[in-house]
Image (cartoon, rainbow, N blue to C red):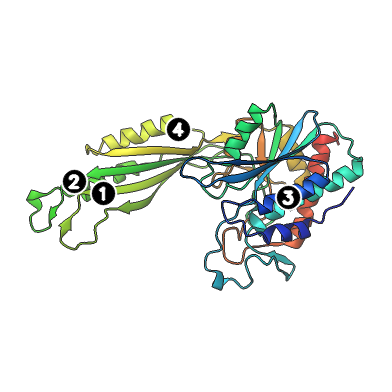
Amino acid sequence: MTLIDPIELARALIRHQSVTPDTGDALDLLARHLTELGFNCHKLTFEEDGTDPVPNLYARLGSKTPNFCFAGHTDVVPVGAANHWSVEPFNADVKDGMLWGRGAADMKSAIAAFVAAVSRFLAKNSGDFSGSLSFLITGDEEGPAINGTKKMLDWLVENGEKIDMCLVGEPTNPTELGQMIKVGRRGSLHGMLSVHGTQGHVAYPHLSHNPIPDLVKILAELNREPLDAGNELFQPSNLEIINIDVGNDSHNVIPAEAKARFNVRFNNEFTPEALKAELTRRMARANINYEIDWWVSGDSFLTPEGPLSDAVAASVEHHTGQTPDLSTTGGTSDARFIKNMCPVVEFGLVGATMHKIDEHVALCDIEKLTDIYGEIISRLMAGK
């Protein structure tokens, strides 16, 4: 059985410039390694009108249950100001005990660590184990997430595939490996708010109606009091106004329309419908006519403690000496889709430099993460 070096595989993946959406080269590299390990690989490309086609990869080894899946993404965010990097963003340089490059933390190194862990597990167990191992890898996590994991899960159902447990390799640790496992996430609700007025000359306000003060009144009502106080599992829900636009470059014209966008990261005190109802009630207090479009990009969820979270927590503690926090903080991830099929938790590398200039991770952390993933596989698949 071929043993895979996690650092060399991570470097090879980083060298593929898979800025979202991944065009497939990084996925092809991954599929070649998994095929050599005995996995049956399916490259799945999905697209919708007006969106980029996105290749994805589902790979499975074995036909028994439980099917333990590793989920992740090979697409990365843009490098930003490339001339501000101290290294070439896609060279995958190793220096000062670190692996540098876009995707090193989020999350090509974690993918490489799990592949390496699988290779070691199979070599140790001669390919004989209870259950199945699988990979669910998308090229569309950092983008709109339309043609990625959600459609892959639909494909699994249509083809009689079932995932029983899933580990997502997102960088969950704030500053040190072993600090945090994500066992849930807050939901995300977007509001696109419009208020109409009557355009006119600023010197003749009686002939016009300025929509900006009306919009400000509505926004003030939205933020007048906290949405909730949070609970022992989730931090408080939070509304942030993220854009205000009147499309007016003139110095002497009252605009005809004012728009605002806001986002709410909400905990399990709300369902999306209950949250929309509460926000609608607040906006009504302003007594202003408005229009609003809603978009829910993910519901809140919590994975109860059980065999999956127990195996991950025990393996992390064994290899790091830390008792990890079981957290629901942070943004959304593709776990928001996977939770509809099976229990899902997230654990990966330190995320302090993800999406930043000079993204990097410690080489020793990649090796340790490989050991942690290997123990998780052993606990779940070999009953150890």
In the structure shown, which secondary structural element does the residue marked by tag 4 occupy?
A: helix
Q: Are marks 1 and 2 in contact (CB under 8 Å)?
A: yes
**Residue 258 in the image, given as x and y percentages of width and height:** 26, 49
Give the mark toward the camera: 4 or 1: 1
Q: How far is mark 3 from mark 4, CA to CA?
A: 37 Å
| Amino acid found under the numbered disc labelled 4 | Pro
On screen, residue 262 versus residue 87, left or right, reads left
Crowd rating for badge 4 (residues with CA inside 10 Å; few <14, some 14–19, many 20+)? many
Give the mark toward the camera: 3 or 4: 3
User: Residue placed at 57% from the left, 47% from the top?
Assistant: 140
Residue behind mark 4:
272
**Residue 208 in the image, given as x and y percentages of width and height:** 11, 49
**Nearest to the observer: residue 206 or residue 179:** 206
| Amino acid found under the numbered disc labelled 1 | Ala
Residue behind mark 2:
197
Crowd rating for badge 1 (residues with CA inside 10 Å; few <14, some 14–19, many 20+)? many
Q: Earlier in the sequence, mark 3 or mark 4?
A: 3
Residue behind mark 1:
258
Q: How far is mark 4 from mark 2, CA to CA?
A: 30 Å
Residue behind mark 3:
30
Of the 4 image quadrants, the one containing the C terminus is top right
User: Residue placed at 61% from the left, 52% from the top?
Assistant: 23
| Amino acid found under the numbered disc labelled 2 | Gly
